[in-house]
Amino acid sequence: MYKYILAVYLVVLSIHLRAQVATTSFSESAQLEAQPYWNDPANGPKIDLQLPKDFQGRTKAAQAGSAEEIAYRVFRTIDYSDGLETVANGLVTWQLTVSAKQAMTLSFRFSEISLPERGELYLYSPESFMSVGPITRSNVVDETLNTDYINGSTVTLVARWPEVEKAPTLVIDSYMLGVRALAARSDAAFGSSLSCNINASCPSPSPIPDLDLQIESVCKILIGSGACTGALINNACNDYTPYVLTAEHCFLSTAELTNAIFRFNYESAVCVDSDGDSQGVEPDISRWVSYSGGTEISSWDRFTGSDFTLLELRQQLREPFAFSGWDRRNLQPANSTFIHHPRGDVKKVTFESDQTTPDGNFFDFVLTPGTGGDRGSLEGASSGAPHYNPQGRIVGWISSGWPHSVPCDATSSVNSNGRLFSSWLGGGTAATRLRDALGAGRDPNFMTALESANMNGIKNVCNSTQRFTLVNRPPNSLITWTVSPRNLATITENTANFVDLSPVPGRGGKLP
């Protein structure tokens, strides 16, 4: 039994989770310029970023489809002293514009960042009307931060804080130059995968009755110049620890893991577009949920192990979210379902109708799209994608395959997936196995998918008793309710699933 204390605040809801940094796309310049953080780039200093000598060649290769690279990292130090600081009405504003002609997107790595208590940092592009922020001190872990990609070749950085507080520390040690042409206010990789891939919003080719939670748990991982796929995975405590399971070969260094962007909800809202195109519709940026950086919990390499990395996101999750379940038993699935981001495209579902064959630390299988009941393909950036058994639980992850992208008319292919069964004990240490983090000392044979909890109820508690209901209560949880401030309301009745609040006479409160 695991204890959850849910406090109902009349000013702030206690189960609020610290959100990730918001990425916003405005439809026109006037909307961006109407934002309170907007500062005209012409009013501050500007740095022109130098392009690498082979940048144009890489851009042409990416646009022609002959390379899967999405961006190119360049090391250069930019810091607070490069910007301009102004003071007005007790508010300090710092501003700097950076430009890299011919770059399709820009992303920045802050090797040192420390913000005032009431300080905010924004990044925006006057070209694409795209904005990232506010970034506050609650979004920063270990004084480092990697920003999401911003469409355009010019980005303005603006920091604001009360004059009475200390100025921030801002040091950028590198930036990513995008080499792919962009769809309008969308991800550069949209529409890049093979036409036989099936959007996650389509009727599922999988026999799993309901894939909603599994689909919600899967994310695109932006790593340096490329991408992979991963999934939030549940643990035996059902405690919402943001573990992500993916392939070990996706990360060449700890720095790549620390700087990775984990993008959820990157999926087409419709199965096909109005013309019947299987690409679907560009996901609006407002649908994306992105988190910056991960910390490795355990991994087992592809040469001696099963090619897995289990990591923990460095930022807390914003609801709603979901975790995939898993099965660690030594079983051979009758069929398999994969949810992935081929070539970094929107989320797709692929179905393998035959059994996968255990081969040491891996499963082997032959995917033949469109024949024998198989549906969909596997491509670059599908690596790390969860492999689900017919019960909808993770039993493995995509590791390797030949050909690298399985053609839509392929009659044969060779594919290999890491096995969760082998990885449970892994290499025999906490750093090379899944048992310690996912088993949490209980070692269950399997865990089901988990959906985030939330509370339903009206905000006003003024003249009458109001009920607040806990939705998606975590399994095996003990719920305790408290109220703060206590002088505004009292608990008149409660169970594990709901609480009734009655206002103190003359002191009713209101939830935000």
Image (cartoon, rainbow, N blue to C red):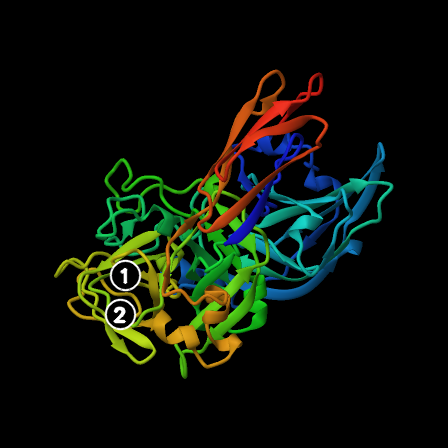
Q: Are marks 2 and 1 in contact (CB under 8 Å)?
A: yes
Q: Amino acid at mark 1?
A: Asn
Q: CA distance from mark 2 to mark 1?
A: 9 Å
At 54% from the left and 55% from the top, the residue drawn is 103
Q: Label 2: state its secondary structure.
A: loop
Can residue 215 be seen?
yes
The residue identified by callout 1 is 389
Q: Label 1: state its secondary structure.
A: loop
Is residue 185 found left or right of 360 in the rendered image?
right
The residue identified by callout 2 is 331
- Pinpoint residue 228: horizontal percent, then vertical percent: 42, 62
- Pinpoint residue 442: horizontal percent, then vertical percent: 46, 65
| Position of 443 relative to 270 (above/below) | below
- Of residues 358 and 437, the one drawn nearer to the viewer in this rendering: 437
At 50% from the left and 70% from the top, the residue drawn is 436
Q: Quadrant of residue 492?
A: top right
Q: Indicate which disc residue 448 carries.
A: none
- Are there few (<14), some (14-19), or many (20+) residues within 10 Å of tag 2? few
Q: Amino acid at mark 2?
A: Leu
- Of residues 406 and 419, the one drawn nearer to the viewer in this rendering: 419
- Lower position in the chain sequence, tag 2 or tag 1: 2
- Pinpoint residue 5: horizontal percent, then vertical percent: 59, 45
Is residue 289 found left or right of 171 in the rendered image?
left
